[in-house]
Image (cartoon, grey):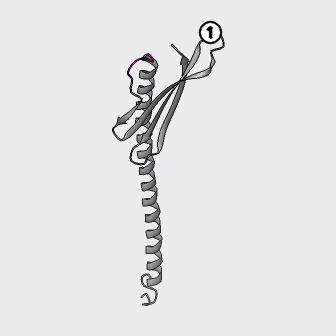
Amino acid sequence: MIPPEAAGFSLVEVMVAIAVIAGMTGMLFDTIATHARFAEELRKRREATMIAESLMEQAVVLPDRSASPGSGRMGSFAWNVSKRIESSEARDTRVPVQEIRVRIADVATGRQLVDVRTLRLAR
């Protein structure tokens, strides 16, 4: 027969086990929440990059005199397209070089997500 003192777990042992499980559960939830935030940030950056690439193609293809808008909003993103002539010239052709820059920002936070630049020969 087992003496009564040796049967089962003591209250202290049960409380320690519950504390360890609670701590591990808290760390697990924190990891899941961090992963969800990173996934949302990645989704936003990916979408902003696609918008920037589209706007860059439009800015490169359309001539300077076209009525391409310089800024606007698309969904939860604010974008800005700027074109400026660089002071230096292309080395071989002596044609002015134009910088085209596209910036995409998150409207909710105001934080810049994408900044894309390219150079082309000015027309």
**Which is nearer the eye, 73 or 65?**
65
Q: Write down the quadrant of residue 39 in the picture.
A: top left
Q: Residue at x 44, y 16 (%)?
A: 63
The stretch of residues the image draws in magenta is: 63-67
Q: Is mark 1 on a helix, strand or loop?
A: loop
Q: Write down the quadrant of residue 29 in the picture.
A: bottom left
**Which is nearer the eye, 66 or 104?**
66
- From the viewer's perspective, tell me whether residue 115 is left or right of residue 48: right
- From the viewer's perspective, tell me whether residue 75 is left or right of residue 116: left
| Residue 17 in magenta stretch | no
Residue 10 seen in the current view = no
Q: Main secondary structure of the magenta part?
A: loop
Residue 92 seen in the current view = yes
Could you say where residue 68 lies in the image, as x and y percent from the top left? 39, 23
> Eyeballing the image, is 39 above or below 81?
below
The local crowd at label 1, few if under 14, some if 14 to 19, many if 20 or more residues have their Cα within 10 Å, is: few
Tell me the residue that label 1 is attached to. Answer: 93
